Image: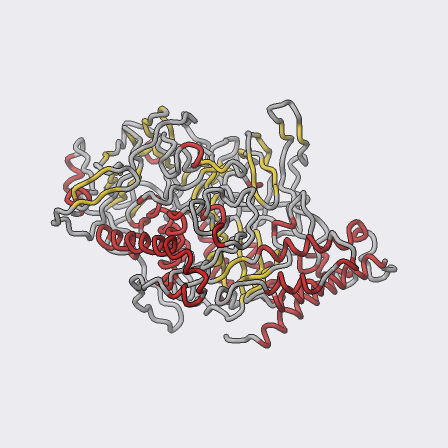
Amino acid sequence: MVYYTVSGIRFPCAPSLYKSQLTSFHGGRRTSSGLSFLLKKELFPRKIFAGKSSYESDSSNLTVSASEKVLVPDDQIDGSSSSTYQLETTGTVLEESQVLGDAESLVMEDDKNVEEDEVKKESVPLHETISIGKSESKPRSIPPPGSGQRIYDIDPSLAGFRQHLDYRYSQYKRLREEIDKYEGGLDAFSRGFEKFGFLRSETGITYREWAPGATWAALIGDFNNWNPNADVMTRNEFGVWEIFLPNNADGSPPIPHGSRVKIRMDTPSGIKDSIPAWIKFSVQAPGEIPYNAIYYDPPKEEKYVFKHPQPKRPKSLRIYESHVGMSSTEPIINTYANFRDDMLPRIKKLGYNAVQIMAIQEHSYYASFGYHVTNFFAPSSRFGTPDDLKSLIDKAHELGLLVLMDVVHSHASNNTLDGLNMFDGTDSHYFHSGSRGHHWLWDSRLFNYGSWEVLRFLLSNARWWLEEYRFDGFRFDGVTSMMYTHHGLQVAFTGNYNEYFGYATDVDAVIYLMLVNDMIHGLFPEAVTIGEDVSGKPTFCIPVEDGGVGFDYRLHMAIADKWIEILKKRDEDWKMGDIVHTLTNRRWLEKCVAYAESHDQALVGDKTIAFWLMDKDMYDFMARDRPSTPLIDRGIALHKMIRLITMGLGGEGYLNFMGNEFGHPEWIDFPRGDRHLPNGKVIPGNNHSYDKCRRRFDLGDADYLRYHGMQEFDQAMQHLEEAYVHDF
């Protein structure tokens, strides 16, 4: 077998099999079930795989009773107080001296290795201070909660729901106070990646994992020949497992960069091997179904160093929504490096000032569009290494482009081999137990936002991408699903305030959104947060201190739905008043990102605006040296006007999915096999083809095609907006 090396990791060059939870798309959302084995083609020269494991993974899917949710003390908290703190997630009352303690309460010594005691020090991550340009680091802080009352001045009609809104804000303030008291503040609480996962220090590596359902745990991997008896972990009273591995005699780290690692646990569901929840890189080996966690810590000289400052937030966002994997004109999975070199200059030339990248968080099933996340802290290895992603972001910053990440905190993959589901053998570890913890349409797991450790995990995850990779903000996916216990399914939001503030509201989830917006805007003042909310929830884009949820923008999803509704009608039934009302119907002081169509409309089973307008004529009459048709002439004209009026009236920001600017003639269809339903029916796949999982930018660039004129119009539209709303 031929091998090659990327940043010190030795990978075999071979095709692979990858696991697929078969998915169909309904209304731009995902449902999945089943398992299939899809042959992955040789897609790009730098494939990223770990070698084949020398062990068998034994995991179970049994559903078990809820596990206890507990606190982990922060090293900086003083534990002298004797007051009590009640954990609402379990009803357990702990003395504060139990909850707090000093640093030693978190560090579990390994009694079987006396020599380790002599060299062990509290493991603190090694940090580098990087100076970029002439900018100097400024102290960042998260302001204390405000009064939360300004929302009633902004919208007096909210006064009728003061009981709900004041309760929401009081719960938010209570949680902020408890985080201040027990964790040293939201700043410290959101640095969970400095306490959990693999932590490198001058003396060795500490690994910690929260798994209260496990009764025994050991760290296994290439470094100890997958011997479960070599590095057994110890558990503290909070369900945190820990082990310290001292450096080798020559001073080298005990786990080499690029090593495969997993945690083996004895759980209520049996013995299972899991990818660490805080893992920073995860890959799939040839011929294997599960992913392998990779200890990613390249030598200093191989780490990417950012060279360019992050751009300031523009007054008016013009967002180019994109997917790295399908950004090639060829039927392959594209790479971070190719996207950096080919796509970013294109996006800049088109006149957009922000690129929103989908499917960054690792997801074992490619066709989930990145929405069934398995490893929350790991960038997808399909496209390259973590350092490749950093290089992409740095290049975007050099071009003056903001880079927004499509982050998924609304749900998680139900994959038990690679993800968080049943991580410690219990159904309720990171998620609600029972039916409340399962999204029946998306076939995924739903987080318990009332759990202390879930809050730590998700807040730290948001901060990780901003701090480590220098993303400039997020588009939060599926926020409607988070904010309501019915997840917005089979519910028609009419605008009646009773729909937003009542028993259907998941207050814990809303408070999490308030916390994450507070953390982001306090520590990263230039960062942008956009929430995907179809409900039109009042206060969604009002600052948290004023009583709002805290997002900068709402994704104005009603506009795209209105255009599809209009396109189904006869021309004479188009009512401009109806169109203008939809475009301008947004709440005072709550900004929106408008779009005529996004990735949702480009998926197989749906239609883009270009297809609605021109259909099959696009295949035969788009050459400029051939006669046009009335359908093509009408379609091109309306395609331009729909975009122009959407940008002009629709919101304070604008979004376009890549390729739609020139009326991409084909849909998106991820490679998939046949789907065998329980009733015996077979839904045909596409023979695992990548043909429709790409973007034909060559069509927009070809000046002999009418696509080129559509692209030129979109480009002129972006630059016109730039000229009149310019603040760089």
Q: Position of residue 135 (x, y in %)?
A: 37, 72
Residue drawn 26% across the image and 36% down it = 239
Q: Please tell me whether residue 545 is drawn above or below residue 275 in the rendered image.
A: below
Quarter where residue 452 is shown:
top left
Judging depth in this view, the residue of 337 and 101 nearest the camera is 101
Is 280 left, or right, of 584 in this rendering? left
Q: Is residue 6 visible?
A: no
Judging depth in this view, the residue of 303 and 281 nearest the camera is 281
Judging depth in this view, the residue of 551 and 220 nearest the camera is 551
Q: Please tell me whether residue 319 is drawn above or below residue 331 in the rendered image.
A: below
Residue drawn 67% across the image and 46% down it = 606
Is 641 left, or right, of 299 in this rendering? right
Q: Position of residue 126 (x, y in %)?
A: 29, 54
Q: Residue furthest right?
A: 627
How many labels sit on residues? 0
Residue drawn 54% across the image and 60% down it = 355
Q: Please tell me whether residue 15 is drawn above or below residue 720 in the rendered image.
A: above
Q: Residue furthest front?
A: 160
Q: Please tell me whether residue 356 is drawn above or below residue 234 in the rendered image.
A: below
Q: Position of residue 288 (x, y in %)?
A: 50, 31
Is 198 left, or right, of 651 in this rendering? left
Quarter where residue 18 is shown:
top right
Residue drawn 14% across the image and 42% down it = 118
Q: Position of residue 451 (x, y in %)?
A: 33, 43
Give the image's coloring scheme: secondary structure
Q: Is residue 158 visible?
A: yes
